[in-house]
Image (cartoon, grey):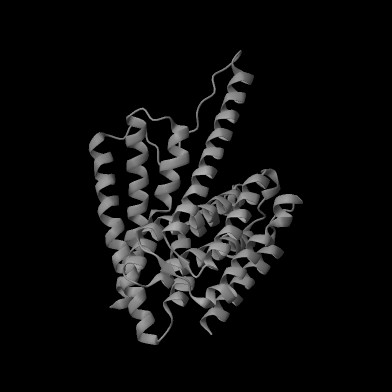
Amino acid sequence: MVYLYLALGLVILLLAGDALVKGAVNLALRLGVPALIVSLTIVAFGTSAPELLISVKAALEGVPGIALGNVVGSNTANVLLVLGVPALLAVMHTSGHDTRKSYVVMLGATVFFIALAFRGTFDRIAGLALLAALAAVLFDSFRDALRHRRDGLAAAAASAEIEEEEPEGADPDMPGWKIALFLVLGLVGLPLGADLLVDGATEIAARFGVPDTVIGLTLVALGTSLPELATTVMAALRRQADVALGNVIGSNLFNLLAIIGVAALIKPMSVDPELLRFDLWVMLGASLILLPFVFLGRDLGRVWGVVLSALYLGYVALVLS
């Protein structure tokens, strides 16, 4: 039954997170909040709500290894698996998008996160530091988005209107009762799914004598990375995976700064020494692998897909051993 609870918890989390995003996005747009603000805030937070709930619950229940392992393992999986598997199916022309600035910010956040980890605990000071860094990143992104939109409007003001891109989950025709239903399903489902998944993962760890950090790095991290993997695979099959690199960079940045930042504010989390010796450096190494794709204009082809996927399988094998 423990595996059923684990799978059920993961499914509920994914469905509830999607429902919350749809409900919150459409409520915000109904209230007149600009789509730009919605995309930078509600969608970003909503899509990471499952990971956030898992980390908070794990911290409260005294299993910080699941919380920290989930973030570190997810960031590693996002690079090696979420980019590697789709590249096996089709070449991803990542050179068509300039992600240099966001990539440098992600590397900086990764180094900052590792430095805080060497304090031995993610306490409230570390949580505030991570959230302050997140606020600075969001402010800079918002300013860049406004500048980009303003430049676009100025260039086209004389001839046409610029149609603002609708954020993920937006539906102008969604009735009010449906918005309310999505919000209720999301708000009820997220804590329920997190409860089932964390309890199941903790039980598996205890049953097999596996440290909770290992469960967080592998089983939980892989589960929470499945939506990104599925989305990127479908995009690759449709030859539309050009923005996958940017999505991975943004997801990793948010995982490091927001999820652990919030969880650390709620309850301090001790850092497993094994994370300091091995897993944090694997996460940093996986991030550095992206250098040629970001700065040298290399596309992600099948050879790189094999390399990245093999590296992830090798990493999981090492962690489990």
Q: Give the answer, above or below, for where 86 lies relative to 93.
A: below
User: 296 or 310: which is nearer to us?
Assistant: 296
Q: Is residue 163 left or right of residue 185?
A: right
Q: Position of residue 302 (x, y in %)?
A: 68, 62
Of all residues, the one furthest to the right in this rendering is: 296
Any part of residue 122 in sight: yes
Q: In this orientation, which residue lies closer to the viewer: 24 or 107?
A: 107
In the shown orientation, is residue 319 left or right of residue 70? right
Q: Is residue 97 left or right of residue 140?
A: right
Quadrant position of residue 198: bottom left
Residue at point 58%, 58% (across, down): 112
Above-or-below relation of 37 to 204? above
Residue 39, above or below 3: above
Residue found at x 36% / y 67%: 58
Q: Position of residue 118 (x, y in %)?
A: 55, 68
**Residue 86 seen anywhere in this rendered image of the structure:** no
Q: Residue at x 54, y 19 (%)?
A: 161
Image quadrant in which the N terminus is located? bottom left
Q: What is the quadrant of residue 211 in the picture?
A: bottom left
Work out whether residue 52 or residue 183 is closer to the camera in this orientation and state it.
52
- Looking at the picture, how far across and down is residue 8, in whole percent? 31, 67
* Residue shown at the point (30%, 51%) measured from the top left: 186
The quadrant of the image that shows the C terminus is bottom right
Q: Quadrant of residue 195?
A: bottom left
Across and down, in percent, residue 163 comes to 51, 25
Total tally of numbered discs in the picture: 0
